[in-house]
Structures are given as structure tokens and as C-alpha cells.
């Protein structure tokens, strides 16, 4: 399925297996069904699950993770409305 | 996810303070400020990290908690219509997930990830020095 296709899902949700109107779906052999859309959703989940970042990506993720944790902890140690060990 | 966007929007819009009236906060002791007020102060630094803000555009970039960052922009388009965009970056062990309403989530890569990494480091370092008056930890010695 071409991810750039533009679909129009009119009004209420279709019943299972019912065809969905397609306004712009160049090259498609058949109307897109709710089953097709569900398959795309599952593919997205699987793709995310299989996401395997390279070392440079992991390097940046590590930096962002460290900065986020340190920053949040310091702010919580200052804020008057957060129950957190306070900075000396 | 919805809860985090709600929290972010509350931080952005608020009910008892606007971003335009935050400067007086700087004269108050930090220890008397709430976490939300501190985030609003930090956001003034965050808004400067991605270059000049076009006239008529409001930009916010801030850390929500240990796992989430928010980028928010508001502007009036050529037809005079109010537009806004909110992006949440979620820190996960295997990557940074980009979350926007109505758009499939995706892990960011390449230049976008580098830009975010640099922005987060700068936000942390400048906030520590300029707001909290303390030296930040060294996170990336190669910088």
C-alpha cells in the first residue's frame, strides 16, 4: 500500500469489511477497507517494535536522556510544590 | 499520551499567568516558585534556541519532566487564520519518539535528532547557569 495515498472516510465508521470511499487513490485496484487500515496500524506498531537505532543515534538518545533526567531532578529539588529532596 | 498533551497545554496557556508577564518572576526567589513557574522561566531560554522567532509567531520549547520535551508554535497564516502546532518528544531507551496529534508517531533520526540533542544540552546548560545559578554536569565531553 502506498503510504502517500489520501483516503476519505465519510461520516460514521464502516462496518467490518465494508468498503470505504476513496477520493484520491491513484493506482489502487480495489477500494480500501477497514481491514486494510487495521493492517497499516499493525505494521506501524511492528515497525516501531523492530526499530533498531545505530550507534550515533543511541549516542544522542543517551545525551538527551541524561540531560532530561538531570534537569528534571534539579528543578524538582528547587520547586516549592514538589515533594523531592531539596538542593542544599 | 492525551494526559501529557493536556499537561503541556496547561503549561503553555495556563490560567493564572501568561508568558508575557513572566519577567517579574525573575525577581522572586526560585525556592518560592512552583514547578510550573520554573518551567515557564526556562521556556524563555528554550524559545531562543532555534534561531530568531518570526514576527507574529510565538514559540515555546521546554522540558516537561524526565522523559518529555515540548515544542509549541503559534502563528497567523497568510489568510489571517490562527495556526498552532505542538510536538512532544518522548525519551525512550531505543530512541526519541516524536508525537503530534493526527500524525503517526515516529522515532527521529539524522539532523533532526542532532538538532534536538544540541537544543536539549544548551537548554540544560543555560538554565542551570542563568536561572539556577549553578554549574551543569558535563554530559557530552566531546562538545
Image (cartoon, coloured by chain):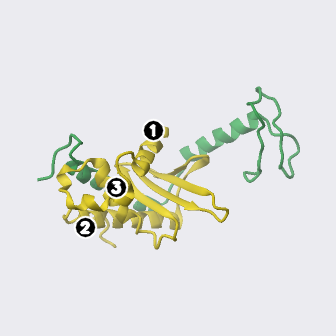
Chain colours: A green, B yellow
Q: Earlier in the sequence, mark 2 or mark 1?
A: 1
Q: In screen coordinates, is A27 left or right of B80? A: right
Q: Do residues under tags 3 and 1 come within 8 Å of each other at their CB atoms?
A: no
Q: In screen coordinates, is B140 left or right of B107? A: left
Q: Position of residue A16 (x, y in %)?
A: 76, 26
Q: Position of residue B38 (x, y in %)?
A: 28, 54
What chain does badge 1 belong to? B
Q: CA distance from mark 3 to mark 1?
A: 19 Å
What chain does badge 2 belong to? B
The residue sitting at 34% across, 55% down in the picture is: B40
What number is the disc on residue B70?
A: none
Neighbourhood count class around disc 1 (C-alpha, 10 Å): few under 14, some 14–19, many 20 upward: few
| Residue wearing tag 2 | B130
What chain does badge 3 belong to? B
Q: Earlier in the sequence, mark 3 or mark 1?
A: 1
Foreground residue among B140 and B117: B117
| Residue wearing tag 3 | B40
| Residue wearing tag 1 | B3
Q: Circle 2 sits in a helix, a strand or a loop, which is it?
A: helix
When the figure is inspected, residue B106 is found, relative to residue A83, above or below; the finding is below
Amino acid at each position: 500500500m502506498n503510504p502517500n495515498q489520501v483516503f476519505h472516510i465519510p461520516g460514521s465508521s464502516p462496518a467490518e469489511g465494508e468498503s470505504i470511499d476513496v477520493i484520491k487513490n491513484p493506482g489502487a485496484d480495489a477500494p480500501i477497507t477497514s481491514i486494510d487500515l487495521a493492517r497499516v496500524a499493525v505494521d506501524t506498531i511492528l515497525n516501531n517494535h523492530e526499530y533498531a537505532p545505530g550507534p550515533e543515534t543511541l549516542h544522542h538518545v543517551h545525551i538527551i536522556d541524561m540531560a532530561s533526567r538531570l534537569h528534571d531532578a534539579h528543578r524538582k529539588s528547587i520547586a516549592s510544590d514538589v515533594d523531592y529532596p531539596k538542593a542544599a | 499520551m492525551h494526559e501529557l498533551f493536556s499537561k503541556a497545554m496547561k503549561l503553555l496557556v495556563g490560567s493564572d499567568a501568561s508568558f508575557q508577564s513572566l519577567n517579574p518572576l525573575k525577581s522572586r526567589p526560585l525556592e518560592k516558585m512552583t514547578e510550573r513557574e520554573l518551567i515557564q522561566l526556562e521556556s524563555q531560554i528554550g524559545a531562543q534556541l532555534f534561531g530568531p522567532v518570526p514576527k507574529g509567531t510565538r514559540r515555546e520549547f521546554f522540558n516537561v519532566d524526565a522523559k518529555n520535551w515540548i515544542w509549541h508554535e503559534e502563528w497567523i497564516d497568510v489568510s489571517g487564520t490562527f495556526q498552532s502546532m505542538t510536538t512532544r518528544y518522548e525519551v525512550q531507551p531505543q530512541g526519541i519518539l516524536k508525537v503530534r496529534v493526527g500524525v503517526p508517531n515516529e522515532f527521529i533520526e539524522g539532523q533532526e535528532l542532532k538538532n534536538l540533542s544540541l537544543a536539549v544540552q544548551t537548554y540544560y546548560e543555560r538554565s542551570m547557569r542563568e536561572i539556577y545559578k549553578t554549574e551543569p554536569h558535563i554530559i557530552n565531553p566531546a562538545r
